[in-house]
Amino acid sequence: MGESYQLNVELQPSEVIMRIKEGMTQRSELLYEELNDLGNGRMIGTLIYERFYFRSRNQAALVIIVDNLRGTASNVRLIPAGASQGLVLKMDWGAGQSFASTVEEILEDYVVK
C-alpha cells in the first residue's frame, strides 16, 4: 500500500471541498468531485486531481476524502498515486508528498492540533 496523509480541520466537509477547489485551480486538473449529505450534519466527499510533473515526466493523481463522521471536525485523507515511472521501480521522487502538501498548505489555518 502506498503512502497517505491525514489531517483534521475545523471546517465542515463542504467548506473543505470548496477551499481545496479554490486553492487548486491553477495547480491541477479536477477529474472527479462528489459530496454526499448523510443527514444529521454528517457528510462525506471525494475529490480526485491530476497533475503533470516535469521533473519525473509523469502524471500524478491525488485522491482526497473528507468526512465528519467522527465528530465536528472534518477528517481529510490525502492519497497520492500514479507518480512513478516504471512497473518495477516505484519511485515518485517526492511528487506524491509534494501533491499532498499542496492541500495541507491550503488548509493549514484550519488544522486541529
Image (spheres, grey):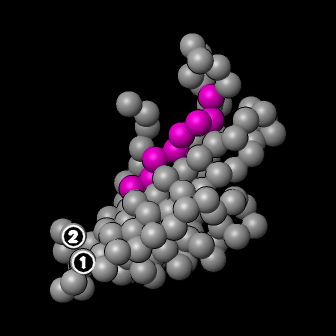
Q: Give me the residue at 64% from left, 19% from top.
A: 86
The residue closer to the viewer here, 108 or 58, is: 58
* SS assignment at label 1: strand
Question: In the image, 12: left or right of 95?
Answer: left
Q: Quadrant of residue 101?
A: bottom right
Is there CB contact under 8 Å for labels 1 and 2?
A: yes
Identify the amino acid type marked 2: Leu
Q: Position of residue 103 (x, y in %)?
A: 55, 62
Q: Looking at the image, which residue sits at the far right? A: 54
Image quarter where the N terminus lies is top left
Q: Position of residue 28 (x, y in %)?
A: 69, 59
Identify the amino acid type marked 1: Leu
Q: Position of residue 98 (x, y in %)?
A: 61, 47
Disc 2: which residue? 69
Image quarter where the C terminus lies is bottom left
Q: Which mark is residue 38?
A: 1
